[in-house]
Image (cartoon, rainbow, N blue to C red):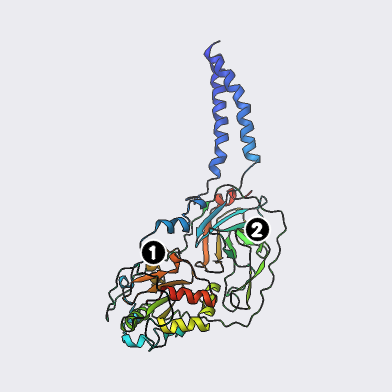
Amino acid sequence: MRSSTVLTVAALSGVPVLAALAFAATVHRHPVDVGFSESGVDVAMHLSQDGSKLLTTFTPQRPGFHLYSVGLPADGIDGLGRPTRVEVAGALRSQGPLTAESPVRMLAMQGTDVSFPVYPDGPVTTELPVAMDSQGGAKVLVSYAACSPQECLMPVSSHPVELTATTLSSMRG
Amino acid sequence: MRKCVSLVAVASAAVGLAACSSPSQHREPAGAAKPVGAAASPESVRAAHAVPAAPIAAAPVVPAASGAVPAHAAAAGAGRNPQPGQAAGQAAGQGAAHDSASAIGAPVLIPSGTTGAVPQPAHPHAAGGSARPAGASRALAPALPRPAPAPPQSAQGTNIGYDPNAAATSQIMNAVAAAQMDGKTVLLDFGANWCTACRALDKAMHTPKVRSVLQQRYHVVQIDLGNADPAHMALATQYDPLGTFGMPLLVVLNPDGSVRADSARSGQPKYTEADMAAWLNQWAVR
């Protein structure tokens, strides 16, 4: 068999395989999480498959730490506590209130009769209904504070996350 | 003719390879820097950090503190937020305490009347801002999101006592100067008025036993970190240079200003009357 024939057969047999791989990659896309780490919390966000929800997961790096409810007022309760916030601008527009998938629990503050709405220790994922423009980048502002009964880490206020159009596209599941 | 067919086939295979490799390139975000998991954990950083905290003498004086307060004034309260332990006139070393502590910090020179500009280092928790991929996708629980409940009301006060406008460096110097005169220990309490753990500490510090220990053995200075004041953050970072501390950060100073203990390394005391009093007695100068 001539070498040219071998090349021909090899090439022709490889085309369907490569095409199938390309198809699979197109159909089964994994959303890319975009995020940052600050003040003892890892923050990762991506969009739902239809692009209608911005899902942000907050993961305290140390055990025993919790985040405050998204429903906490901006200045906390009597000045105590800081809410979890996710705000969008640019190509992403908020279409509803921020919610969380984790149930809120009331944490009694040591030595007082005050209790605060917090999420269970560990990761919590928030959902923000969004609409996405076809072009342009977006900015997400993230705020939170992580505390344990014994200590609070430095709060993060309006940490900006710049998202290019390419990044937005890759964040969709 | 055969050669032509072969060339066409090879070319088509090459095109197919290129088509398959392109999707992965699209997934790379423009602002990619590093994965989330690449950040060093506070535990690992702290474990590797064995150097005692820098003494206060390393800090230039806050300009606002240029109006030097006489050293003896600190004995009557080293700041605008008088604490139970700031009353003057109590001899150091009183009270039944076991003194198992030893100084872990270098001696400190107390600047006298010097003034200068405080360096404005980058806030250790300043926002980075660039987006980066965080690795694999995450599976979310199928539960429907639920709106957060309305926060409860309470009748607690709103201010613990951390004064964002206080001249912290001057207050610390005054407290150390007072400690040099009366032999007491200096307690630095870095915290914030929004910090729930700081409120719990504040409650404990106002209990009878703790008040007694503070009054007899300590000069207390509260430093506000709630407004990310660069000068105050720089002070706190001196005692935990990697900025991995939580609030409240309690730092105990010897009368010479050297660091005797700090909660970032020794661990936070429990904020009960008994535990807090025991912690203070443990670290107080005999």
User: Does residue B174 appear to the left or right of B222 in the view shown?
Assistant: left
For the question of whether residue B229 can be seen, the reply is: no
Of tags 1 and 2, the one toward the viewer is 1
- The residue tagged 2 is A131
User: Does residue B217 appear to the left or right of B111 in the view shown?
Assistant: right
Residue at image position (62%, 33%) is A21
Comparing A171 with B253, the one in front is B253
Residue type at mark 1?
Pro
Image quarter of residue B243: bottom left
User: Does residue A4 appear to the left or right of A99 in the view shown?
Assistant: left
Cα distance, mark 1 to mark 2?
43 Å
Say if mark 1 contacts mark 2, CB within 8 Å: no
Q: SS of the residue at dot 2?
A: strand
User: x%, y% of residue A51?
Assistant: 65, 53
User: Label 2 marks which chain's residue?
Assistant: A
- The residue tagged 1 is B241
Q: Is residue B242 shown above or below B70?
A: above
Residue type at mark 2?
Ala
User: x%, y% of residue B158?
Assistant: 56, 81
User: x%, y% of residue A155?
Assistant: 52, 68
Q: Quadrant of the N terminus of chain A?
A: top right
How crowded is the residue under tag 2: few (<14 C-alpha within 10 Å), some, or many (20+)?
some
